[in-house]
Image (cartoon, helix red, strand yellow):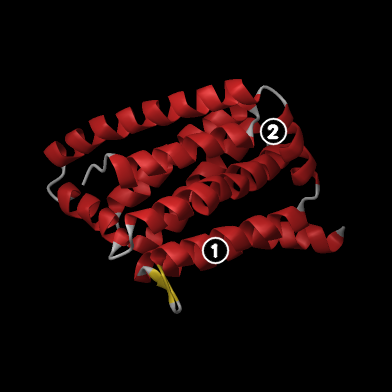
Amino acid sequence: MRVRGRLAALLPVLAAFLFGPLLAWRRLGPLDFWWGMSFSVAALVMLSFLADRSQRTSLLEDLKEGLARKIAWGVLSALVLYGVFWVGNAASRAVLASAGKEIGAVYGFKHDASVFRVGLLIIFIIGPGEELFWRGFLQRLWQKRLGLPAGWLLASGFYAVVHAGSGNLMLVLSALVCGLFWGALYSRFRSTVLVAISHTIWDILIFILFPLG
């Protein structure tokens, strides 16, 4: 029990350690950004299941109850969030002189990676994996300990902070908006499945189908 508690406490530190350099240098050792992101997310998810064994039971129950409704809400919420970013993209470019350059830099993360590979990694690892860790583990844990508002805000804020390694203000602000949005969805529906669907579809829309940069 003590070992699992210590592991749970260390996982946010590990997340910062993995995501900070990855976003700063756009690689993780010999791995390019997308393989590095996939490795980091997969490692964090596996460790989070070791740190909190109830997460597995919670996920299985989540998959059994009202799946069609969760899929519908996941799709709808992804479209709403994409709309928010579409408006924000236009507004930020009009207000901030550096916005266009920084938004373009975010899409530079794709480098020479094939769209097919990026799409597969988003669908099977990055999209669902991020939600399993950030909302299904971290926000769930902090809400248990601190209460809903504080746990939601802390998890959302930390999600934004780990993106600061990129040195890109627009990416950090985007992460904050996404963290608050998916965190609110998770708090409302108590469903990791729903937010995983939302995150994955939004990623596909914003990076593959209808990029804004």
Residue 39 vertical position relative to residue 198 in the rendered view, above or below: below
Q: Nearer the viewer, mark 2 or mark 1?
A: 2
Assign a secondary structure to mark 1: helix
Task: Tally the marks.
Answer: 2
Assign a secondary structure to mark 2: helix
Marking on residue 107: none
Residue 26 vertical position relative to residue 208 in the rendered view, above or below: below
Label 2, label 1: how many angstroms apart (C-alpha)? 24 Å
- Along the line of sight, which residue is nearer the eye, 107 or 69? 69
Residue 55 in which image quadrant: top right
- Along the line of sight, which residue is nearer the eye, 26 or 140? 26
At label 1, which amino acid type do we have? Ser
Percent from the top left, x then y, of residue 17? 53, 68
Q: Is residue 124 left or right of residue 203?
A: right
Q: Is residue 16 visible?
A: no
**Residue wearing tag 1:** 40
**Residue wearing tag 2:** 63
Percent from the top left, x then y, of residue 119? 41, 50
Answer few, some or many: residues within 10 Å of disc 1's Cα (few below 14, many 20 plus, some between 14 and 19): many
Answer few, some or many: residues within 10 Å of disc 2's Cα (few below 14, many 20 plus, some between 14 and 19): some
Percent from the top left, x then y, of residue 97? 12, 47
At label 2, which amino acid type do we have? Leu
Residue 30 in which image quadrant: bottom left
